[in-house]
Amino acid sequence: MTIRHLVELTGISYGSIQRILTDELHMKKVSARWVPRMLTAEQKKIRCEISKSNLEKFQTDPETFLRRFVTMDESWIHHFDPETKQQSMTWKRASSPTPKKFKVASSAGKVMASVFWDAEGVIMIEYLEKGTTITGSYYADQIRRLREAIKEKRRGKLRAGILFHQDNAPPHKAGVAMAAIRDSGFELLEHPPYSPDLAPSDFYLFPRLKEDLRGNKFLNDGEVMAAVEAFLEGQEKDFFFKGIRSLEKRWSKCVDLEGDYVEK
């Protein structure tokens, strides 16, 4: 309901209604928050229960948890993603005209990147070949390659036992993929459905990667891949550690919000 509508209904002046809303009722105008899905009571309950369980595992021995933890996700990276309005801000004199920027959509050209990482950094990156899709069998093969990559790059991690985290995408939950996870000796950490706010790749890694690439035009898939790897290789170990470590805060906040989405 707008202030003008309230003026018509009550006959009170615009300024008086504005004062009542702000000074007497202590209200303020805010933008709506975008959320991935309208959660049902049951979905909130599941999110809350899984967050409690994962939080308990983390807090029992944070150091061991962080050493064992490995996560993954896939994301499309476009040949060109325009800058956001905020990224396009520029300095100008008071007498100068406001600069204009034409609205541009993301390019059709894109690459699907699968990134497997932990608190030390990236363990494995793979790119989907043109004309193929991610299936349960494809993902199962990736899990087997991940095990070999961990063996090569993270000495002692397999012996400590991998605590593996993934979302609930159909290929990830396919029988052949779940069998590959078990055969690899990984312990699967539960992840609630419709919960990108509790997945480190979604709330931390990919947003920072894409923010860095925005505004750059890549001529082909090879240039996109090179830019992705340059960004990830350019990050210090602390960058990845912070992303995984922030799970504790998010699980805790999800419990406090009784399963509702965590914004920050």
Image (cartoon, grey):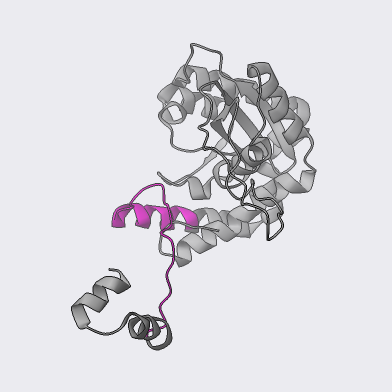
> Along the horizontal axis of the image, is 67 left or right of 44?
right
| Outermost residue to the left | 9
Question: Residue 216: x and y, percent?
Answer: 67, 31
Magenta residue check for 50: yes
Instruction: Where is residue 34? Give x, y as percent.
Output: 42, 52
Q: Is residue 93 left or right of residue 246?
A: right
Q: Is residue 188 above or below residue 170?
A: below
- 134, 232: nearer the viewer: 232
> Residue at left 26%, top 85%?
12
Towards the viewer: 38 or 59: 38
For residue 67, which quarter of the picture? top right
Residue 135 makes an appearance in the image: yes
- The span picked out in magenta is 25-51
**34 to 185, vertically: above or below:** below
Query: Residue at 74% across / 47% down in the picture?
Result: 239
On the image, the x and y values in percent for residue 227 come to 71, 28
